[in-house]
Amino acid sequence: MKNTGMTRPLDPLGRVVLPKELRTVLDIPVGTPMQVFTNGAQIMLRKHSSGCVFCGELENLQTFKEVEVCQSCRTALTDMLE
């Protein structure tokens, strides 16, 4: 994990504003759905992905290390590693 050096306060409704510079660098436009994950005491945000991380396919998805991968991409990856 990389420390950005940015600190933002939590408002009374529990919201935190992501700095514009960070949103620009990570290509997070206004309205982007964000997923929230926890790992012990850590809170992680990630842009929501609603399909295969490689091709966007919505069918036959399987989760691998918290990302969705479709059957055809899993097969292609397996073939590539052989």
Image (cartoon, grey):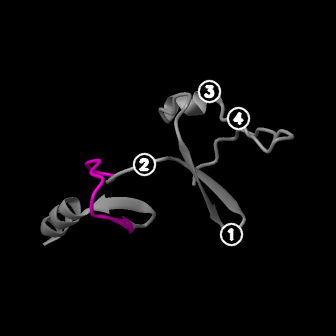
Which mark is on residue 20?
Answer: 3
Q: Quadrant of residue 65?
A: bottom left
Q: Quadrant of the C terminus?
A: bottom left
Real-space Cα separation, disc 3 to disc 2, in angstroms: 21 Å
Question: Would you name the residue on which mark 1 appears?
Answer: 40
Residue 34 in the image, given as x and y percentages of width and height: 55, 45
Kind of residue at badge 1: Gly
Marks 3 and 1, how far apart at CA:
27 Å
Number of labels in the image equals 4
* Quadrant for the N terminus in the image: bottom right
How would you rate the neighbour count of disc 2 (Cα within 10 Å): few for under 14, some for 14-19, many for 20 or more? few
> Contact (CB < 8 A) between labels 3 and 2?
no
- Outermost residue, front direction? 59
Residue receiving disc 2: 49
Q: Say what secondary structure mark 3 lies in.
A: helix
Identify which residue is drawn at 31% across, 54% down: 52
The kind of residue on which mark 2 rests is: Ser
Camera-near label (2 vs 1) is: 2
Q: Residue at x 77, y 38 (%)?
A: 8
**Which label number is shown at residue 17?**
4
Mark 2 or 1, nearer chain start: 1
Q: CA distance from mark 4 to mark 2?
A: 21 Å
Residue count near mark 1 (Cα–Cα under 10 Å), binned few <14, some 14–19, many ≥20? few
Marks 4 and 1: in contact by CB < 8 Å? no
Query: Disc 4 residue type?
Result: Val
- Measured in 3D between alpha carbons, the distance from the residue under mark 4 to the one under mark 3, in whole angstroms, is 9 Å
The reply, left or right, for residue 23 in relation to residue 64 is: right
